Every structure is written in C-alpha cells, then in structure tokens.
Image (cartoon, rainbow, N blue to C red):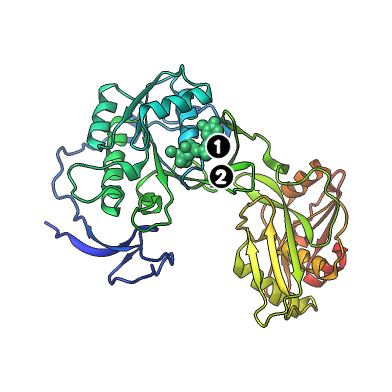
C-alpha cells in the first residue's frame, strides 16, 4: 500500500511545494502554504467495473438540458450534460447563489433538483426566491454542511441535478480537518464527482474565490471536475460575465453576459456593443477594438493616458490588458514608432472593467498611446485590431473578417487591420486599411 505523504499546498492555487515559504512560488499569494497530507492512492475498490463496448452505449449521449438562460447554456457548451460536474467560482457576493437559484427553478420544471446550502438558512433561500419571483418552483432544499447527509438525501429523492452551495462549507465526517481546508475540499469534491458519475446526476459546485489563505479556493479542485466557470464582475460595471476556463463538453473560453437587476439576473443576448457608449466621438487617447471572446466578437474601447509624471519612477499601468504587453508596446514604439516615452506616466485601460487576454489589442493599445501623446484623436468611427511583433511588424489575428463585419454592423466605417486580415472581397459599408508595420499604422490612424 502506498504511504501517505505530506507537502505544502497553497490554499489559493493548489500548487505543491516541498518546503514552506511565506509566499506561494506559483501564484504569489502570501501565507497560503500549509502542510497537507497528500492522500495515498486508495488501495481497495469496492466493486470492480466491467468493461463495456463503445457500440453498446445508449444513443442519447448528446442529451442536454436547457438551463433557462441561453447565455448560461453557451458557457456550459450547449446546455447541461447529465452527470457533469460544474464548478462555479467567483468572489463572495457576485451572484453565484442568485444565478443558480434561477437556473434550478428552470431545470426543476423537467426534473428533480436538489439544492444544498451550507451558507444560508432555508428562510434566507425562501426570501431570495420570493425576490426572484420563483417561490412556486418545485425545488428540494436542505440546509446542511455534512456532505454524507446531503448526498444521502439527494439520493433518496432521486435528484437529477444537485447544487452544492458552497463547497467550502461542506465537510466529510471521515476527515478530521477543518471545513474549507485543502484536504476537505479535495475529499468532498472527489466524493461528489464519484456520486455524480455513478448516478448520472449533474452537479453544480459553488466555490468562493478567497484572498485569505485560511480557506482554500476553487482553483485547488479545478482538475477534478468537468467544467470550470468563473464569474467576473467589475464593481463599476452593470454587467456580470461568466467565462468557461475548462470544459469537457464544449469549447473553453466561452463567455456569457448577464446584468443584475432587482429581480435577479437577466441575460444579455447580443453583447457585441454593450461596452461602447452610444454617441462616442473620437477623442485623444481612445480607440475602439474588436475582441474575440469564445465564439463571438465584442467591441471594446481602449483608452490611454500619457501624462507628465514629474517623478524619477514613471508609472506604467495597464488595467484590462497584460502589464507586460504594455511594456512591450512602449519599447516597440520607441524603436519602430519614433516615440520615446521617458519621464511620462502611461496608463492603459479597457473600458467597462473587461479583461482582454488576446494579442489582437496590441495595435489599438499602441495607437491609443500615440493618440494621447499627440493629443489628437484617431479617425472617426474607426476600429482597429492586430498583434504587434518585436520587429515592429503587424501580425494577423484569427477571425479577422468576422471582426470587421461585426464592426460594420455597429456602424463603424473604417477598419485599421493587419495586412494579412484584409478580406479578399470588399465588405459593405466599411473601408478596410491593411498595414504591415507600426509606422504605417501610425500614419494611417490619424
Ligand atoms: P448572491 O447570489 O448571494 O452572491 P454569492 O452567492 O455569489 O455570494 O448575490 C449577492 C448580491 O446580489 C447581493 O449584493 C444582492 C444582489 N442581488 C440583486 O441585486 N438582485 C437580486 O434579485 C438578488 C437576489 C440579489
Ligand atoms: Mg451565496
């Protein structure tokens, strides 16, 4: 039998270290490493599983259930798959319980849904249901923190969908460690996954993203589940985004858009232009780009501000794009754009609290900086996208034509894009300018 080993495990990201350290070497969180017993592989199996043939599997393998929100179905990969284990992470208060209560009520019209809460009382759940106008929903509820009891109760009412709110409050009585510890979290999720697969029950596991090392976060169990979704919400924005970072039943990187209202979440079906202000006129330091999120386009405004810093340590601050890409753009501007920013502070921001991780926003970020520095607006009704290489070359990005078409649909009349993304056929209503070098792009943008 394998022996149990110990390691230092980070409660925020789950990284293992052999030695203790004050800061996690992986995610840089402080005071999150704790000595943890790594369970040895379970030596005994209660019942051996028999092999079966692929051809003998049932034909309704693609069966999925609609959740009542097309935007949520989208991030799940086209609806809820029976037996799938979905981890739903997010900051406390972002709306995880609210959304899942709405989804439960919708799923409960077709199948038995079991909602287990370890956070709130049944009264609180009832009050929220009333606010959401879902008080009549056929929902089975339990307020309990014992995982064994929750699974037993779910089993006894033959639930097809189970909601665990939240995993950090659940404990397995077989383990002595405290609720919320890495060991408890892994053990509980392990049991839930086993239960889900054996009984073909779909499970949503809510996990709070924690900043404090005392409670382990959902990242610690990401590898154990089928689908991982994260809520993102900027306090200044009306919108809440849900992104899939892993999905065994569909594409990852999908994004669903919701707005929180008095009566719960409302989905935003065509989010293409929601982050743009309606009557935008070209202003210095501002440029519109077309990002690609999951399987659709999203128009975003990128702003830059170049200001006299008057300090020996000028600030370079990126919000919504990668800080390193900003440094890179400034170096490229200096070498290939004839623009050396020395003592000036440079700020770049994506409007609406969005985070864009693709390189297609390189060129617009760079042009926004030039525009702010010159205090001169770019062309009216222009969009721009493209990756910028270290040699000052502009590289094509994926879905170029789709991005241009999306911009044309929103009334933009110019598109400044990498030469490699210029469509062969002329597009209606929008003039496309292809560029190969940073210097050409700067000439064409003003
Ligand atoms: P909640 O779902 O409890 O968050 P989580 O489970 O992620 O911790 O939602 C908390 C916030 O949502 C709370 O600040 C109130 C707000 N809210 C609304 O704005 N409208 C509503 O209809 C509901 C139920 C909540
Ligand atoms: Mg909650």
Furthest residue in direction bottom, as rendered: 312
Q: Nearer the viewer, residue 285 or 416?
A: 285
Q: Quadrant of residue 337?
A: bottom right
Quadrant housing the C terminus:
bottom right
> Mark 2 near ligand 1 (CB under 8 Å)?
no
Viewer can see residue 115: no
In depth, the one of 241 and 196 nearer the eye is: 241
In screen coordinates, is 64 left or right of 201? right
| SS at mark 1 in the image | helix
The answer for how far apart the CA atoms under marks 2 and 1 are is 7 Å
Furthest residue to the left? 1
Per the rendering, the mark at residue 254 is 2
**Image spot of residue 168 (x, y percent):** 34, 45
Q: Quadrant of residue 242?
A: top right
Residue at position x 37%, y 40% from top? 166
Q: Is residue 196 above or below residue 402?
A: above
Toward the viewer: 264 or 419? 264
Q: Position of residue 22 (x, y in %)?
A: 35, 71
* Residue at 42% from the left image edge and 47% from the top image edge: 208
């Amino acid at each position: 039998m394998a022996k149990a080993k110990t390691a230092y495990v980070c409660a925020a990201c789950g990284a293992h270290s052999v030695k203790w350290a004050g800061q996690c070497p992986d995610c840089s969180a402080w005071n999150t490493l704790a000595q943890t017993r790594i369970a040895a592989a379970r030596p005994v199996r209660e019942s051996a599983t028999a092999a079966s043939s692929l051809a003998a599997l049932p034909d309704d393998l693609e069966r999925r259930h609609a959740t009542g929100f097309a935007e949520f179905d989208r991030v799940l990969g086209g609806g809820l798959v029976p037996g799938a284990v979905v981890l739903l992470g997010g900051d406390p208060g972002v709306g995880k319980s609210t959304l899942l209560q709405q989804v439960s009520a919708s799923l409960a019209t077709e199948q038995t849904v079991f909602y287990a809460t370890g956070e709130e009382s049944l009264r609180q759940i009832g009050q929220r249901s009333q606010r959401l106008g879902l008080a009549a929903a056929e929902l089975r509820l339990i307020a309990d923190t014992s995982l064994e009891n929750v699974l037993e109760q779910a089993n006894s009412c033959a639930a097809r969908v189970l909601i665990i709110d939240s995993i950090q409050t659940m404990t397995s009585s077989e383990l002595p460690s405290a609720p919320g510890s890495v060991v408890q979290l892994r053990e509980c999720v392990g049991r839930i996954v086993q239960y889900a697969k054996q009984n073909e029950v779909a499970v949503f596991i809510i996990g709070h993203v924690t900043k404090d090392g005392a409670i382990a976060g959902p990242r610690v169990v990401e590898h154990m589940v089928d689908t991982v979704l994260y809520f993102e919400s900027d306090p200044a924005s009306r919108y809440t985004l849900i992104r899939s970072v892993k999905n065994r039943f569909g594409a990852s990187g999908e994004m669903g858009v919701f707005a929180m209202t008095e009566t719960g979440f409302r989905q935003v079906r065509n989010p293409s232009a929601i982050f743009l202000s309606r009557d935008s006129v070209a202003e210095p330091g501002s440029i519109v780009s077309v990002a690609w999120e999951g399987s659709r386009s999203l128009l975003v405004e990128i702003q830059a501000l170049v200001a006299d810093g008057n300090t020996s340590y000028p600030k370079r601050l990126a919000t919504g794009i990668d800080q390193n890409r900003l440094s890179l753009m400034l170096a490229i501007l200096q070498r290939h754009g004839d623009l050396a920013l020395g003592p000036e502070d440079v700020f770049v921001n994506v409007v609406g609290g969005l985070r864009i991780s693709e390189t297609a926003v390189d060129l617009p970020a760079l042009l926004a900086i030039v525009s702010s520095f010159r205090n001169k607006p770019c062309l009216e009704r222009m969009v721009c996208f493209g990756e910028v290489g270290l040699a000052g070359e502009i590289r094509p990005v994926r879905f170029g034509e789709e991005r241009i078409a999306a911009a044309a649909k929103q009334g933009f009349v110019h598109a400044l894009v990498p030469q490699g993304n210029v469509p062969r056929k002329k597009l209606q209503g929008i003039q496309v300018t292809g560029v190969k070098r940073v210097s050409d792009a700067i000439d064409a943008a003003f």
